Amino acid sequence: MPRGFHLITREVEEALPELTRLRVGIAHLFILHTSASLTLGENASPDVRRDFATWFDQAVPDGAPYWTHTLEGDDDMPAHVKSSLLGSSLSLPVSNGRFALGTWQGIYLCEHRDSGGPRRLVATLLGEEG
């Protein structure tokens, strides 16, 4: 997956057929990587994703002279910092078999490296079926 903020709400829902059985509950999502992150953000305008990327790339620049962890490339340490700022997990309410998100909310997988490779999530669902 290329660097950027990727909406993955639909893919996560499709990968969790058990979600449809929950009347009420919580879904916990955890990304198994230290150079990518998860966040909840506005899901309508692609400008939001571009603005996120622009801000993070300026705030935490690749190749800055103060990075000492550079063996894996100029984008590795900045990716770890960005991941720590955004976080590795989300806890989302579930209602009637779907994520109970606001109208304009979506799940983002935030890839902070130019070529981060495949990313994996662990999902834990808790709740009442119905």
Image (cartoon, grey):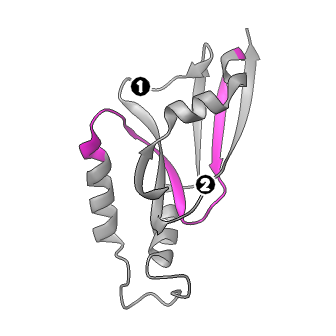
Percent position of residue 84, x then y: 52, 64
Magenta span of residues: 21-48
Across and down, in percent, residue 57 comes to 32, 67
Give the residue pinned by disc 2.
119
Q: Which residue is mark 1?
A: 102
> Could you tell me which secondary element the residue under label 1 belongs to?
loop
The residue sitting at the top extreme is 130
**Residue 124 belongs to magenta span:** no
Left or right, 50 with reference to 93: left
The number of numbered badges drawn on the structure is: 2
Residue 11: percent from the left, percent from the top?
55, 34
Q: Nearer the viewer, residue 9 or 59?
A: 9
| Residue 22 is a magenta residue | yes
Q: Classify mark 2: residues with Cα within 10 Å, few (<14), some (14-19) or many (20+).
A: some
Q: Looking at the image, is 16 positioned above or below residue 90?
A: above
Image point (49%, 90%), residue name: 68
Q: Quadrant of residue 125?
A: top right
* Image coordinates for residue 81, horizontal then vertical, percent: 48, 70
Instruction: Examine the residues drawn in magenta and state their main secondary structure.
Output: strand
Q: Residue at x 24, y 45 (%)?
A: 47
- Cβ atoms at labels 1 and 2 below 8 Å apart: no
Residue at 26 percent across and 53 percent down: it is 51
Q: Of the residues under marks 1 and 2, which one precedes in the sequence?
A: 1
The CA span between labels 1 and 2 is 25 Å
Amino acid type, label 1: Gly
Disc 2 residue type (three-letter): Arg
